[in-house]
Amino acid sequence: MNAHYTPNELQVGIDVGSINHAVAISDGNGKIIREFEITHTQKGFDKFFTIVAKESKQRDAIASIAMEGYNGWARPLDGLILKQGYKLYNVNNVKLARFKEIFPAAAKTDAIDARKIVELFSLQKHLPIAKKVLQEIQVSDSINIQLKKLSRRRKQLVDERMVISNRMGADLQAEAPDLKSLASCVDDLWFLRFITLRQDMRLLIKVHKSTIEKIPRIRKNHIDKITAWQTEASFTDAIDYIASMFYDDAMRILELKLKIKDIEKQIDQLIPSSNIASTLITIPGFATVSAGTLAGEIGTLNRFEGEGSLALYLGMTNLDNSSGKKTGSKRNMATNRHAKKAMINATMQHSRNAVESSVYLKKKISQGKKYQQAIRSLGRHLVRVIWSMIQQERSYEIREK
């Protein structure tokens, strides 16, 4: 075979749906050679790979695949595509929508959308902007994939805990305000453990002091507050049918706290095995959750053209939006919201733990920036540092003056 032989390319576009996916295959020059639909089942996936393999063999070509919803509705098809060794591109939905506005189709169907994805594929060779619409997926290592799943699961549990805590706090305020006033926060462990001593909250009045004293880590001032409350406790009439609800909510919050703590322990154990997380954890203020979340969401630096692209992904900078004499910027819609929140929180903690960064933050505020703007400015600076640290495989260093 000729050493300079270059195989043909098949370009596959998938419009992802919750039940069915529309597929279009072109010959690499934009000409559609096959269209079909698959179900979101193993049978459907098998059909997809059989057809793609058959078309590739017939044309002595290598298939590249672009799809909407990578790591979303596309799962697990996206993972199976990568496992099969195909190049996979994620379609930027916002830019695809703009493309369809400029070059509208006669109608709006999933099959037409799949064809539009293929058209974008063909334009990559001619229009640089098309490369921004189709982004090649770079596979993260298994550790960072685990960190992503664990950190997102933790976030879901934290959100659930907050919802239940807010609900229980509001209900206590309405039905037993004196009981609510015992704790500064209704999800304090000692308070939850006291609430769960009895399924019917009204029976808490009769709990003996010796039982209360056995609550783990309860303080004397808490015990005194509880015993004082027991002598003059009062409830509204609604307590007859909602008393057990408080017990259920308190038990769920305790359960969530344990699950969250367990996930944080798992994240902590994985951090030393992740190049990104083990680097981030050396930065003052970047604790287990932030470092693990960022490592999981970033995955690999190979996904980014440079530190500027990483800064956009983390939400630490905006896109330029200037025209004529007017200069400005606009929000980047492709920012990863999970990574942005983790980066903001870590940067805030960092500013409290690193003297130079604290000085930098105060300087930005003195220049007229609001606190959140100043934090993002510091975060933008940290992205440059993080990029360099990971590339050079070195830890954070505090420079001595």
Image (spheres, helix red, strand yellow):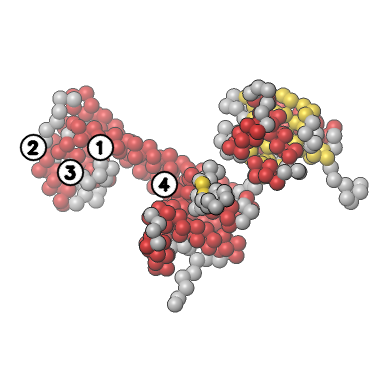
How far across and how far down the image is residue 90, in percent? 64, 40
Residue 131: name its quadrant.
top right
Gap between marks 4 and 2, in whole Å?
39 Å
Q: In the current view of this chain or complex, which residue is farthest to the left?
A: 231
Q: Which residue is mark 1?
A: 169
At mark 1, the secondary structure is helix
Q: Is residue 363 left or right of residue 35?
A: left
Q: Point out the tag, 2 or 1, that comes first from the N-terminus.
A: 1
The numbered dot on residue 182 is 3
Gap between marks 1 and 3, in whole Å?
12 Å
Whether residue 142 is visible here, answered yes or no, is: yes
In this view, the residue in front, 270 or 23, is 23
The numbered dot on residue 262 is 4
Q: Point out the tag, 3 or 2, that comes first from the N-terminus.
A: 3
Gap between marks 2 and 1, in whole Å?
20 Å
Residue at position x 25%, y 44% from top?
A: 185
Which is more foreground, mark 4 or mark 1?
A: 1
